[in-house]
Amino acid sequence: MKYLSVGRTGMQDSDNQYFRQLFIIGWSFFFTVQIFAAQPGWVEKRPVDPNYYIGIGVVQKDIHHDYIQRGKNAALSDLSSEITVNVSSELLDIAIEQSGMTEEQIRQEIRTTTRNELDGYELVDTYETRKEYWVYYRLSRALWAMKKQERLDKAITLSRDLYQSGLTRAESGDITGAIRMYLQAFEPIQKYIAEPLKTSVNGQNVYLKNEIYSQLQRTLSAIQLAPVKADIDGKYSMALDSPLQVKSEFRIGRKDPINVANLPLEFLFLRGAGELVSDVVTDEEGIGTSQVSKITSPEQVQIVRVKMRLDDLVPGDTSLTLVRNIVRSLAAPETRIVLNVSGLVARIESSESNFGKPLEVAYIEPLVKNVLSDRGFSFSEENSSADFLIDIEANSRKGSIVYGQHVAYVDMNISVLDMRSGEEIYKQSFTEVKGIHLDYERAGLKAFENAGERFKEDFSETFFTKVFSEQ
């Protein structure tokens, strides 16, 4: 009896476990059916409501742990894209022309601005399955229009105040300050690049962005840059004796020209090369001055361009691209200065003798001239016009005769004096430079030839390094 009782209990436990599993499976199936049966209509078909903007987002739950926040972001991005579908083609064309941006860049700017300014939206519903999370937001069209208009009005008011401040500064003669204000006036409205922005300025109805842009163009076109001295003489590897200077004036209508002070300028070699002060600001007289500390190109005609640095007047905290793109599209005033560059001048005094007899055709002097000519030097017979005095003394002497071969030696001294400072900047001696030939005369000439090669290598490395690095 005890054996049969134990067996019956085991059978009862097995039956209970079976029914529990069956119950769980049944409820799971029922729950799954209910989930899919309860799928809302907005998931299957996007709703259309004339009173609301719609935003729907869906995220894969098994991929993103933060699927709720991601779903919200996706829905709001969808909502903002619906708001910005319609942009006036005419306003878009104007924005492209003025900003230099592409249509896609402008549309992306609008989408970003709209997304950042979303406000007043409401959660309508959510829905999720084991794998997906859906979220549905909406925003009242009337509420959005009201809030957008409030932001526009505020931006237009601030921009208009900055613009009028620029006009006032221009009237007082502060042209640079006026330009700075015009550029700052773009900042409050740069997020509304494709909006008409109609307002009143000094009693006239205008489209504000177009008005600021046009006034900026008129102001820049009325600024004239002219060199104080258009042609300046200089020497290769040396500093200019005269400064580079330009005069900046504002000319419009019949008014007397106004000196444009505090105008940022850039001095830049367009042709040739040199070391100069590139960033300059005009003084109270409208004069911008730069110094060339060294001309590093041997070109005879060199050109320095002087151009207004409009970028320097753009507010430093500008985060969006509109203002800087507008600046790049504008033609900034500029002018040019011509440099007439001559090479350095050398005077050569040479004494070359072969066994005490002056050479009819010198060896060392022509070599020196060739080396210097390659570096743009010219030559003079007068000390007064020479930058350098080069003194050459070279003499040969006889050596021994070995198996019919005659040996000669050349001793050579070369000195270079900087005539401007009086400093001896190069001095070198070459002794016992050997030459071998069938007779002494030709052995002496061979020694001169060998001495010339040694001199050429040393002179190029030492003299030119000294001259062109210290001028």
Image (spheres, helix red, strand yellow):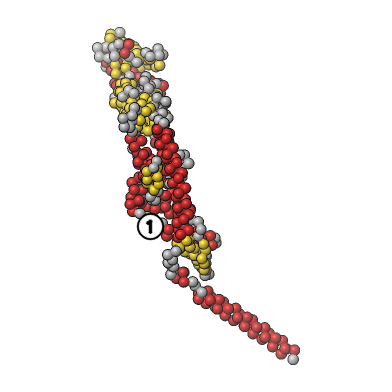
Depth order, front residue of 375/40: 40
The amino acid at mark 1 is Asn
Q: Position of residue 177 (x, y in %)?
A: 43, 34
Q: Is residue 425 shown to the viewer in this render? A: yes
Which residue occupies 32% across, 23% down?
229
> What residue appears at the point 59 percent right and 81 percent down from the top-left corner?
22
Judge by depth and name the residue closer to the eye, 375 or 42. 42
Give the left or right position of residue 71, taking residue 410 as reference: right
Q: Is residue 207 above or below residue 440?
A: below
- In the displayed structure, would residue 355 be above or below residue 369? above
Q: Position of residue 34 (x, y in %)?
A: 53, 76
Q: Position of residue 324 (x, y in %)?
A: 40, 42
**Quarter containing the N terminus:** bottom right
Q: Residue furthest front?
A: 203
Q: Quadrant of the C terminus?
A: top left
Question: Disc 1 marks which residue?
Answer: 86
Q: Residue furthest top?
A: 356
Q: Residues within 10 Å of mark 1 (few under 14, many from 20)?
A: few
> In this picture, is 78 found above or below 404?
below
